[in-house]
Image (cartoon, rainbow, N blue to C red):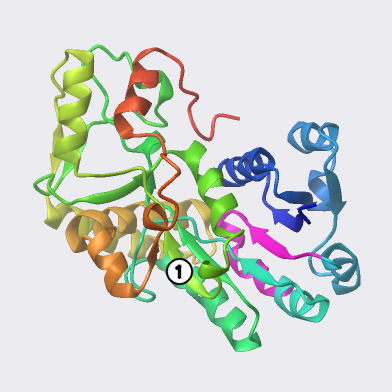
Amino acid sequence: MVVKQKVLLLGATGETGASILKGLQESGNFDIEVLVRPASKNKPSVQKIQEQGIKIWCIDINESSDLMSALSGVDVLISAIGPHGLLEQKKLLQAAKSAGVKRIVPCAFITVAPPRGAMLLRDEKEEVYNDIKFLGIPYTIIDVGYWYQISFPSLPSGKVDYAMIVPNSTIHGDGTAPNILTDLRDVGRFVARIIYDDRTLNKYVYTYGDILSENEINRIAEELSGEKVEPTPMSNEQIEDSVAQAKAALSQNPQDPMKRTVLYISQYKHSKYVRKDNSPAYADYLGYLDARSLYPEFTPLSFREFFVEVLAGKMKKVYSS
């Protein structure tokens, strides 16, 4: 008889968290419980999870006594908290250590980037990682590059705009920077494998379905659609200017979530296309493990397969609910 690992998941109603929840369920290797804020208890997304027979803990993470109950017997704590709540994870750490949690997977799930200086979003994530290491809690950091779902171009016909947050076909720099890309639906499938694997304990791991430049993505889109992508160029200098402007705007009100989001987006572009951080070569340099090498039996969705679905009108726009 296989003993299932007990997983407590924070952020299960977000895009990443929902993928992780589904991946854990599909694997069959885990007993899953979900941690939500009391204010979210009656949300339809939370009710939907509860209807699946999954135990919901409605807890204010500032209340350590309640947290200890939720963390009791937990093998793996996974956080998919939103970008504006990253530092709140710190409130979980001492309780997790006291409860004997065997592995923490803090909220990473972004592009490969240096630990400081390139992206505010990364800096705050690394601050949490460093607190985990200070406490000596076993951990795994999982980065997934950029999602296919936000990496495809608009077409002249507008046929794929329904699946885009904001229709655009910008080419950054010369369009040749290679980028690690993962289908959002595969994030959870990778996570289920990674957290079940002792080789990934106290390691950084990256996932990918494809490694593609913007030029390569556009060629695939053109081949499959029969349309000519009409890219809007954005130079490296323009990207750098956008970062400087976003930093200046945020300095006026450092806690403004919209200004933070604008900075996150501009720094993503700089890191991906100017610095070219989000690549297997840089991930290897930083010491990441390659999930594709760890799990050769698993074939993730390719970008080509994804875009066929987009053209067929079968793709749901992310952040649409």
Q: Quadrant of residue 250?
A: bottom left
Can you name the residue that lies furthest to the left here? 174
- The percent coordinates of residue 222 (x first, y second) are 17, 21
246 or 197, which lies in front? 197
Instruction: Please tell me how many numbered marks the rendered image carries.
Output: 1
**Image: 43 above or below 306:** below
- The percent coordinates of residue 25 (x first, y second) are 69, 40
* Residue 53 magenta: no
Can you name the residue that lies furthest to the front here? 1
- The percent coordinates of residue 302 (x first, y second) are 34, 34
314 or 291, which lies in front? 291
Q: Is residue 15 left or right of residue 279?
A: right
Q: Is residue 197 left or right of residue 224?
A: right
Please name the residue shown 37% across and 66% down the image. Answer: 119
The residues colored magenta run 74-91
Q: Quadrant of residue 88?
A: bottom right
Disc 1 marks a residue whose amino acid type is Tyr
- The percent coordinates of residue 29 (x first, y second) are 70, 49
**Image: 186 above or below 221:** below
131 or 105, which lies in front? 105
Please name the residue shown 51% across and 61% down the image. Answer: 108
Q: Which residue is mark 1?
A: 204
**Image: 48 above or below 297:** above
- Quarter of the C terminus within the rendering: top right
Q: Residues within 10 Å of mark 1 (few under 14, many from 20)?
A: some
Q: Quadrant of residue 8?
A: bottom right
Q: Is residue 10 left or right of residue 304?
A: right
* Residue 79 magenta: yes
Please name the residue shown 23% across and 31% down the image. Answer: 169
